[in-house]
Amino acid sequence: MKNTNTVTVKVGDVITVMYGGKKVNLTVRRLTDNISTWKGEIINNSVYYVLPPDRADVPGAEIQYRHDEILEFKPSKNKAMNTNSKEFKAIVRAYIMACVPDVQTIAAEYGQTIEDTDKARVNWVADTFNRDYRHAVKHYGKQRAFSEWLQGLPSAIHIDFMNYRIIELAKQWGSLPADDTEWQEDKIISNWFNFILFKFWQLHTSLNK
């Protein structure tokens, strides 16, 4: 793709890449921005996460492509993603899991050994919250207590909290269109911790069925 470093790819865009020796079109589910400038030249080392065509129904099967591996790309339409879609749910799940410390960190900083699974790590966060905020849970209920716990920026789960970052994530995930309004941004920001609260316990429930 010509002038690839000047191309901006976002969540929801379709990229053409090589997979299994063939060209395939895959939708970007999440990404890691890494764009810099060196001596006037734009360097794009961004990484894009997609699901391979033969495992499209398995959220944990994501594979990644570097920006320079993209052959072509097609921008998504300028509209917000359906937040009830499987794609959006998979994106949020990946974000939450990325915010939870890995088992090595849990062992080193908390002196606790757990299994290296999503279920064990999510349950560890829930157990940490219940231990630290058990009195608040009794007085205010689990939802309000958990929201306040998140806003206190606990080390057990590293959720983004800066307004600009929350808006950036919402646009990456497709829950905000590129031409969003100030009112839409304010709504996203004001509901952020309640949104994470709901998605965390939704994930906790699904992992413990």
Image (spheres, rainbow, N blue to C red):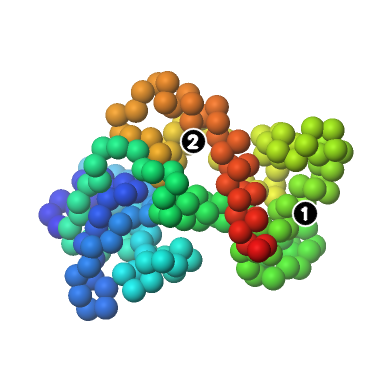
Evaluate whether residue 68 shows in this view.
no
Q: Which residue is mark 2?
A: 166
Under circle 2, the secondary element is: helix
Disc 2 vs disc 1: Cβ atoms closer than 8 Å? no
For discs 2 and 1, the disc positioned in front in the rendered view: 1
Name which quarter of the figure residue 70 lies in: bottom left
| Left or right of 17 in this view: 121 | right
Q: Residue at x 67, y 62 (%)?
A: 208
Instruction: State whether residue 16 is above or below residue 135.
Output: below
Image quadrant containing the C terminus: bottom right
Answer few, some or many: residues within 10 Å of disc 1's Cα (few below 14, many 20 plus, some between 14 and 19).
Answer: few
Query: Tag 2: residue type?
Result: Ile
Q: Residue at x 84, y 43 (%)?
A: 134
Q: Position of residue 84 (x, y in %)?
A: 45, 46
Q: Residue at x 77, y 51 (%)?
A: 128
Mark 2 or mark 1, earlier in chain? 1
| Label annotation for residue 127 | 1
Answer few, some or many: residues within 10 Å of disc 2's Cα (few below 14, many 20 plus, some between 14 and 19).
Answer: some
Evaluate whether residue 53 shows in this view.
yes
| Left or right of 53 in this view: 123 | right
Query: Tag 1: residue type?
Result: Asp
Under circle 1, the secondary element is: helix
Instruction: State whether residue 186 is above or below residue 137.
Output: above
Image quadrant containing the N terminus: bottom left
Nearer to the camera, 153 or 93: 93
The answer for how far apart the CA atoms under marks 2 and 1 are is 26 Å
